[in-house]
Amino acid sequence: MPDSSIFDAEADAEARRLIARIDALSTVHDPQHGGVRVRWRRFGNGNGDTQPPLVLLHGGHGSWMHWLRNIEALSATRTLWLPDMPGFNDSDAPQRPALDPLLDALGGTLDSLIGAHREIDLGGFSFGGFVASRFALQRGDVRRLALLGSGGHGTLRRMTVEMINWRAARDRDEERAALLHNLHALMLHDEAAIDALAFVIHDISCHGTRFRSKDVSLAGGLQAALDAIEGPQLLLWGEHDVTADSRPLVAQLVAGHANRQGAVIGGVGHWVQYERADEVNARLAAFFA
């Protein structure tokens, strides 16, 4: 079990200062579509006039902060648009808790910000990976698509540790212990990666989640969506990702598809862009360049 010293008040305060510093680099937008307000954060100017904006979608029980360790590196050369998807963190929940209204609000608000039919690059993590694949189909005008630890693959998970229902905790101490347990069981493989920043992001994001993503992710449909999308695709998984058996899955998804490249990053778990930020940043920068 990770060291509970991550709950130290000083470590917690430092993590929150870092989140606030990155957040302060953004321009915040709150467009509405169909009565649903979606919070978008825009980072960087980069080559916004010569390259498509890069849209990054977070995972289930997540928020824009799933990309916190990637924002500065990627926004150095690109304009980034990061939403809290409908039903998560600072955004409204769709009136009907299903994928179609989420996609509708996401697409409508993005188009109001950057213009309909403007070409984008698109990335998605976990549940956000499957959302990205469906979003690319629905909206179109996606130049390149990168998925990290994507949901929707329809193959078996390899969870070895049961998750704990943190909402049933009797007090804050029990709740924090449950959230820390889940962070290790699902998100991160190396205990050394489970620091105060990872916990604060997980804590805030879990409390801000009002959309049940698990059923959508487990229903499958990723491969069919990828098969219908044109343009280059990058598929990344962590070696120890418990949401899939990553090596055979990547091999299966890329076989026979010249427009797809896949990689399994060694020694890491599901939240690969946090646990191995430098390597993932380099891979994404090269792919989207």
Image: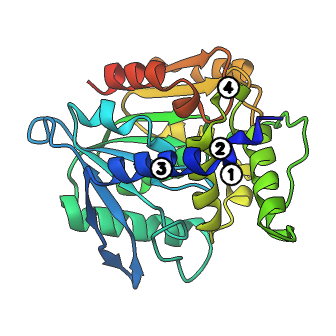
**Image location (x, y in percent) of residue 74:** 31, 32
Residues at badges 2 and 1 in contact (C-beta under 8 Å)?
yes
Marks 3/1: CA–CA distance: 20 Å
User: Which callout, 2 or 3, points at the residue further toward the start of the chain?
Assistant: 3
Q: Is residue 228 left or right of residue 164?
A: left
Residues at badges 4 and 3 in contact (C-beta under 8 Å)?
no
Q: Is residue 127 above or below residue 207?
A: above
Q: Quickly name the residue at label 1.
A: 217
**Image location (x, y in percent) of residue 244:** 75, 32
Q: Is residue 122 above or below residue 210?
A: above
Q: Amino acid at mark 2?
A: Gly
Disc 3 residue crowd, few under 14, some 14–19, many 20+, Cα 10 Å: many
Q: Quickly name the residue at label 4.
A: 192
Q: Which mark is residue 151?
A: 2
Q: Is residue 128 above or below residue 212?
A: above
Disc 1 residue crowd, few under 14, some 14–19, many 20+, Cα 10 Å: many
Nearer-the-camera pick, 45 or 179: 179
Q: Quadrant of residue 109?
A: bottom left
**Image location (x, y in percent) of residue 194:** 66, 35
Q: Residue at x 43, y 69 (%)?
A: 104
Q: Quadrant of residue 245?
A: top right
Q: Quickly name the residue at label 3.
A: 65
Q: Nearer the viewer, mark 4 or mark 2?
A: 4
Q: Amino acid at mark 4?
A: Ala
Q: Which mark is residue 17?
A: none
Count of all numbered marks drawn on residues in the image: 4
Marks 2/1: CA–CA distance: 5 Å
